[in-house]
Every structure is written in structure tokens, then in C-alpha cells.
Image: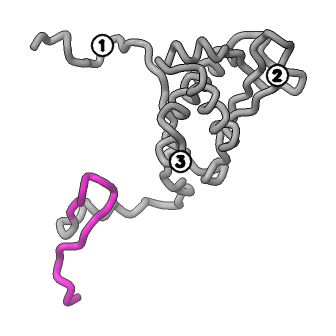
Amino acid sequence: MKTNDFITRKSRLPPYLMYPRFLIDLKLSETAKLVYILLLDRTRLSESNRGWEDEEGRVYISYRHSELAEKIGKGKTAVKEALASLEKADLIKRRQDKVGRPGRIYVKLPPSPWPENRPPDGRKSVPAAAGNPAPPPYKSKNYRIQNNRDRYAYQGDDSL
């Protein structure tokens, strides 16, 4: 294998789409998830360009069914079904514009399962403590890390 086949710190990544983690657990078809990812990507683009906000400041996008179908390699019917399931799941809102023109699509985010002051990656926020904090349990010789996660098991003598 050539060295340039591997990603290094200096590698330039090809364009890619973000896959939101909340989609993994949703009961949606893979087509609907892929359509949502494309809609979310286009929304990020509309967000950075002027003229793609409504009177209430909500960003919207315009995407023809035929264009979406071509991007995902499916037919228009599959795209229409995916859009309908995304709307039913309350992940998008569609509003028809003029006849013959693509309507507006408002991409929505699901309600946040964590409080506003909690980091989005699932970690608990830790308030600032006075004095020196206690060392993590894995610094002790009687603990070992399990599964490379922040779970520790005591291996010492329980007779204390």
C-alpha cells in the first residue's frame, strides 16, 4: 500500500456529509435518513447565504424531487415517501410556493434530550470545585479501566 492512501494529520479530506447521531435511533428508512442528511447539508449552505430566510428568520431550502432522486440514486416516489416520513417525524416542514416551482423546506432539529447547560456529547458538566480536586480513580493501583470507557472496576481487597 502506498503511504498516501492513509489519512494523516496533513491529509485533506474529501467533501463529506455529516450524519447526526440522533438519526441512528430513529425508526426511519435509510432513504429518509439520507434525504434528511442532504437537506441538512443544503440548509447549512442556505444559512451562510443571504436571502434564504423567511419573515420570521427561519432558514429554508429549495430542493426539487428530481434533484434529490438523482443524488440518492432512487426514484421520485422514494423521495416523496422519504419527505413524507420526515415530515411525519417532525424533522421537516414543507410549504408549497407557486405552482410549478419547488416549495420551501424547513429543516428542523429534534428536541434536545439534555439541558441547555449540558455538553451535547453526553458528558455531564462539572461545576468548578474549590481546592484541589480528587485524582481520578484510575490513578490508584487498585482500579483498572474497562472497555476503554470511563468505567472503573475496583480490584483491591474488600476487607477494609
115 displayed left or right of 100: left
Amino acid type, label 2: Gln
92 or 66: nearer the viewer: 66
Mark 1 vs mark 3, CA separation in Å: 38 Å
Q: Tag 2 or tag 3, which sits nearer the N-term?
A: 3
Q: Tag 1 or tag 2, which sits nearer the N-term?
A: 1
Q: State which quadrant residue 45 falls in.
A: top right
Numbered range of the magenta stretch: 144-160
- Please rate how many residues cluster around mark 3, counting C-alpha atoms within 10 Å: few if below 14, some from 14 to 19, many from 20: few
Mark 3 vs mark 2, CA separation in Å: 26 Å
When the figure is inspected, residue 25 is found, relative to residue 12, above or below; the finding is below
What is the x, y in percent for residue 62?
Answer: 71, 15
Q: Residue furthest left?
A: 1
| Residue under numbered circle 2 | 96
**Residue 65: numbered disc:** none
Amino acid type, label 1: Lys
**Residue 27: numbered disc:** 3
Could you say whether the residue bearing mark 1 is in a helix, strand or loop? Answer: loop
Q: Residue furthest right?
A: 55
| Residue under numbered circle 1 | 10
When the figure is inspected, residue 80 is found, relative to residue 137, above or below; the finding is above
